[in-house]
């Protein structure tokens, strides 16, 4: 009887020990759950977090980032997230706040440690002198498309690494090591891109949406208008007539568009002799642009090809 009791106690102890070990291992192995608003932030997070993160972007690269189609599947993803990374500057204002309210995750609400605004250290272009939402301007805090300048990509990476380190300080050394490696990689590309893009200096272009300002400043292009009347406002016939005249006067070479319809860009191109050029403004906007580095490289090479062929 005593032998049977001892065997039973041993079995119970063994089961409890294995159960505790499995639970502890699960906790230790659990990845940091990161949700980003655009795929650029997701790709950079993967470079820094590697196997320690589980990251997903709400927006797809082929969508217009100001107006991402909201899906019911977003809610449980946000509910389980440890970190939320966003572009900020109110870029996501039309679709993200309502999702956060429904998701009921206090960790990722504004002001909380899990809410990471990646614009905090960016030198913002085109700050507003007057905010009037009645006119439909969707850049009320300045231009939020800073992801298109690779030097800002370094700033984004540093912000993400700091956020991951605060969330999981036990892995800070790993995050900093991965950050350093990624910054070294960007530092190899940035001077190469600067040299490649030299023929773009002085090229005059018209974007559909006001999103290429940071790229243009980095590489010396000159913007001579936008297809939209102002950010988020589709062109009127009078606006298009005036834009054609200005493009002809300025000898604009490119009309750049992304997820928008090609109707107006092609119309303008046919009337002015400029080239209508589709370029991704986010990672995944084109199959060849499936990482942040590849997106910047694709945009520069495609723009160069269009300018040289004109």
Image (spheres, rainbow, N blue to C red):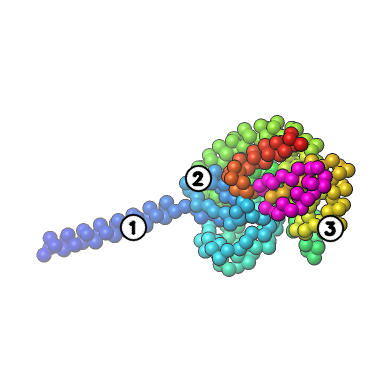
User: Given this view, does label 3 or label 1 mark the residue nearer the observer?
Assistant: 3
Task: Check disc 3 and report its element: helix, strand or loop.
Answer: helix
Residue drawn at 87 percent across, 47 percent down: 246
Dividing the picture into quadrants, the one containing residue 140 is: bottom right
- Distance between the alpha carbons at the discs numbered 3 and 1: 70 Å
- In the rendered structure, find residue 237 and report the number of the disc placed on it: 3
Please name whichever residue, 59 or 306, is drawn nearer the observer in this view of the structure: 306
**Residue placed farthest to the front in the image?**
270
Front residue of 27/273: it is 273
119 left or right of 33 in image? right
| Circle on res. 58 | none
The C terminus - image quarter? top right
Q: Which residues are magenta?
A: 259-281
| Residue for badge 2 | 50
The residue under label 1 is 20
Q: How far apart are the alpha carbons under marks 2 and 3?
A: 50 Å
Q: Earlier in the sequence, mark 2 or mark 1?
A: 1
């Amino acid at each position: 009887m005593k032998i049977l009791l001892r065997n039973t106690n041993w079995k119970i102890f063994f089961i409890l020990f294995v159960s505790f070990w499995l639970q502890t291992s699960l906790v230790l192995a659990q990845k940091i759950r990161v949700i980003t608003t655009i795929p650029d932030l997701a790709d950079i997070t993967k470079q820094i977090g590697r196997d320690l993160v589980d990251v997903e972007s709400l927006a797809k690269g082929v969508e217009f980032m100001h107006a991402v189609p909201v899906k019911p599947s977003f809610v449980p993803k946000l509910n389980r997230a440890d970190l939320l990374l966003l572009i900020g500057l109110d870029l996501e204002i039309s679709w993200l706040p309502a999702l956060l309210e429904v998701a009921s995750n206090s960790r990722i609400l504004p002001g909380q440690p899990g809410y990471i605004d990646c614009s905090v250290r960016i030198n913002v272009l085109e700050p507003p002198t007057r905010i009037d939402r009645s006119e439909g301007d969707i850049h009320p805090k300045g231009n939020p498309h800073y992801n298109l300048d690779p030097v800002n990509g370094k700033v984004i990476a540093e912000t993400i690494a700091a956020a991951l380190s605060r969330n999981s300080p036990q892995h800070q050394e790993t995050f900093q090591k991965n950050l350093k490696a990624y910054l070294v990689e960007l530092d190899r590309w940035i001077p190469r891109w600067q040299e490649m893009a030299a023929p773009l200096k002085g090229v005059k272009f018209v974007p559909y949406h006001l999103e290429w300002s940071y790229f243009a400043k980095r590489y010396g292009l000159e913007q001579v208008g936008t297809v939209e009347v102002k950010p988020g406002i589709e062109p009127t016939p009078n606006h298009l007539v005036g834009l054609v005249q200005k493009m002809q006067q300025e000898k604009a070479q490119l009309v750049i568009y992304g997820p928008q319809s090609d109707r107006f860009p092609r119309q303008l191109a046919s009337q002015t002799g400029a080239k209508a050029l589709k370029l991704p403004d986010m990672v995944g906007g084109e199959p060849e642009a499936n990482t942040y580095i590849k997106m910047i490289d694709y945009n520069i090479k495609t723009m160069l090809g269009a300018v040289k062929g004109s």
